[in-house]
Image (cartoon, helix red, strand yellow):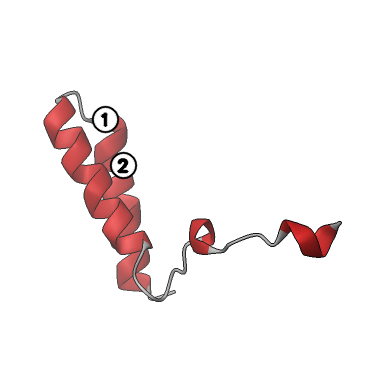
């Protein structure tokens, strides 16, 4: 992970943790989500589970 990106994620998370305005909070969460969904951070939610393989 790039240090600059990690710093940006930490800063956004810190802002979101203290934000009281619901609209600004949502905007911060959307920014965090966009950063986390970039190709260097593959979302584990995008992986489909093949339940047939585990049974």
Marks 1 and 2 sit apart, C-alpha to C-alpha, by: 7 Å
Where is mark 2, residue-wise?
A: 14
Q: Residue furthest top?
A: 20
Q: Nearer the viewer, residue 4 or 26?
A: 26
Compared to 27, does 3 lie above or below?
below
Q: Nearer the viewer, residue 52 or 28?
A: 52
Compared to 8, does 13 lie above or below?
above
Q: Quadrant of the C terminus?
A: bottom right
* Element at label 1: helix
Q: What x and y, as percent, mark residue 35?
A: 30, 62
Q: Nearer the viewer, residue 2 or 44?
A: 44
Q: Nearer the viewer, residue 36 or 17?
A: 36
Where is mark 1, residue-wise?
A: 18
Q: Which mark is residue 53?
A: none
Residue visible at 78% across and 60% down?
Answer: 52
Q: Quadrant of the N terminus?
A: bottom left
* Element at label 2: helix
The part of the image, by quadrant, that contains residue 38 is: bottom left
Q: What x and y, as percent, mark residue 28?
A: 21, 44
The answer to whether the residues at label 1 and label 2 have Cβ atoms under 8 Å apart is yes
Q: Dot 2, how many residues are within 10 Å of its Cα: few (below 14), some (14-19), or many (20+)?
A: few
Q: Dot 1, how many residues are within 10 Å of its Cα: few (below 14), some (14-19), or many (20+)?
A: few
Q: Is residue 52 left or right of residue 16?
A: right
Q: What x and y, as percent, mark residue 42?
A: 47, 69
Residue 55 shows in the view: yes
Residue 7 shows in the view: no
Q: Is residue 24 left or right of residue 33?
A: left
């Amino acid at each position: 992970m790039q240090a600059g990106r990690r710093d940006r994620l930490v800063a956004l998370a810190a802002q979101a943790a203290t934000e009281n305005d619901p609209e600004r909070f949502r905007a911060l969460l959307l920014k965090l989500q966009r950063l986390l969904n970039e190709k260097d951070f593959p979302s584990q939610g995008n992986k489909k589970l093949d339940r047939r393989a585990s049974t």
